[in-house]
Image (spheres, grey):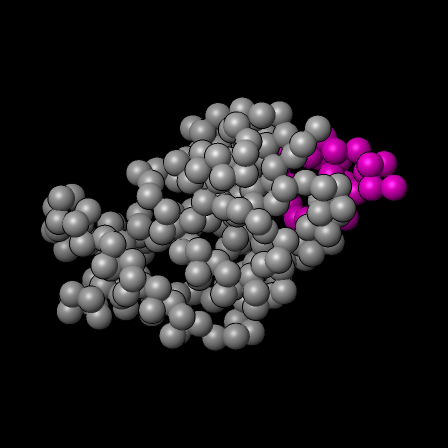
Amino acid sequence: MKRFILFDVDGTLIESPPSTVQVTAIREHFDLEVSLAGVRTGGMTEQEILTLLLKSAAWADKEIKSAMPGLLKTLDVVCAREFQPGSTKLLPGVEDLLDALDRLDATLGLITGNLKSRAELKLRDVGIWHYFSVGGYGDDPHEMRSDLVRLACERAGFRTDDLGVYVIGDTWRDIKAAVEAGVGNRVGLIGPRHPKEEFEEAGANIVLSSFVETEKVLEAFGIPSAELS
């Protein structure tokens, strides 16, 4: 079976330090002060976060849509300027899992709210960018995160309902996007901020606490570890 494994980035593959680059981009682009205080942005795309911030300043949908292309360019500049090499940390078991899936000839992709350039900065920083050949990113056209799942599958030559397609993420929004896109293998990576119940309610049918012990992770995916030999 051909397999297409889509990974979220932050909280799934890596840990990144807290960032308010969207706030900075809006300040620099519009000379407008907004705040992310008290907002849970896990699983949101850059465009969704920017939209939320502009709506908090009473911007109308039409204004936001018109301003978004230029604002994304400013965000790209801010992200590149503020990125600190060595600031991202690879999560346990990730590289061994990616290596195993690569040896199984799986196509590996990204489904992330990050701008593509920002995802590349982070994953190059921890040495795993080369594993990923395709993806759906926060600067791709989309109304919902599920649009990015569909786009990534299309780019890789898969249908979202193919048996070998997986979406893996650490928030309920990742799982919801997979459900809405029609993906059958929906993998939730639980943590302190996102308990098992949250993923099950969103529609996860595989739940993991980490990627440690590669063979057990593959078995949870329904991939016999014997295929590695």
| Residue at figure coordinates x 38%, y 50% from the top left | 138
Q: Position of residue 96 (x, y in %)?
A: 74, 54
Q: Is residue 156 left or right of residue 118?
A: right
Which residue shows up at 48% across the image and 58% down it? 119
Magenta run includes residue 218 = yes
Where residue 107 sits in the image (x, y, percent)?
A: 63, 42
Which region of the structure is painted magenta? 205-229
Instruction: Name which quarter of the figure residue 26 lies in.
Output: bottom left
Report the quarter where the C terminus lies: top right
Instruction: Tell how many labels.
Output: 0
- Where is residue 193? Give x, y as percent: 49, 50
- The relative height of residue 33 versus residue 103 in the rendered view (above or below) is below
Q: Give left or right: position of 198 versus 129.
A: left
- Asked if 160 appears above or below 218 in the picture, the reply is above
Q: Residue at x 22, y 70 (%)?
A: 28
Task: Provide residue 25's location: percent of width, then percent of height.
Answer: 27, 66
Does 95 sit above or below residue 209? below
Locate residue 163 relative to residue 115 in the image: left or right: right
Q: Is residue 40 visible?
A: no
Give the farthest residue toward the right.
229
| Residue at 49%, 65% in the rendered image | 121
Q: Is residue 147 magenta?
A: no
134 horizontally vs 29: left or right: right
Residue 18 in view: yes
Instruction: Identify the image quadrant of the N terminus.
Output: top right
